[in-house]
Amino acid sequence: MKITNLFNTANIYNKSNINEKRLEKKNKTKDSFVVSDKARDFQNVLKAVSNAPDIREEKVNNIMKKMQQGSYNISSEDIANKLIK
């Protein structure tokens, strides 16, 4: 008794090769990267903040002058309100 093409294995193998070739053709497209407008805006804001000075020298100098002149007075209520917030 001769058994041939019992499970049709030759055709199954050929079909899998064809499917792999189709996948290779589909995968040849290039990847792309697109930055959203929101991300671009965030990047611009982040850059502006990082370039801003940590200390506002003009404001500090103004307060120091007032302290030296004795005209820099802050009420204790204002301090308490700021601490609570």
Image (cartoon, helix red, strand yellow):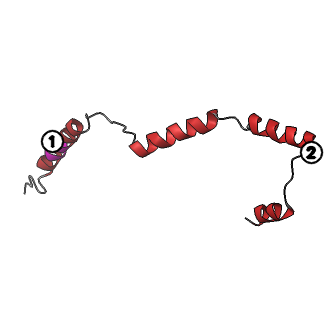
Label number found at residue 38: none
Q: Residue drawn at (86%, 62%), measured in percent from left and top?
A: 76
Position above or below: 67 against 84? above
Q: Residue drawn at (23%, 37%), measured in percent from left and top?
A: 24
Q: Residues within 10 Å of mark 2 (few under 14, many from 20)?
A: few
Q: At which x and y percent is residue 70?
A: 92, 45
Segment colored magenta: 14-19
Disc nearer the start of the sequence (1/2): 1
What residue type is disc 1 on? Ile
- Which secondary structure lies at badge 1? helix
Would you say residue 15 sits in the magenta stretch?
Answer: yes
Q: At which x and y percent is residue 67?
A: 89, 43
Image quarter of residue 30: top left
Residue annotated with mark 2 = 70
| Alpha carbons under labels 1 and 2: distance apart | 89 Å
Q: Is residue 47 left or right of residue 30?
A: right
Q: At which x and y percent is residue 26?
A: 21, 39
Count of marks placed on residues: 2
Quadrant, the N terminus: bottom left
Would you say residue 60 sits in the magenta stretch?
Answer: no
What residue type is disc 2 on? Gly
Residue annotated with mark 1 = 18
Which of 80 and 63 lies nearest the eye of the viewer?
63
Image quarter of residue 6: bottom left
Position above or below: 26 against 82? above
Q: At which x and y percent is residue 27?
A: 26, 38
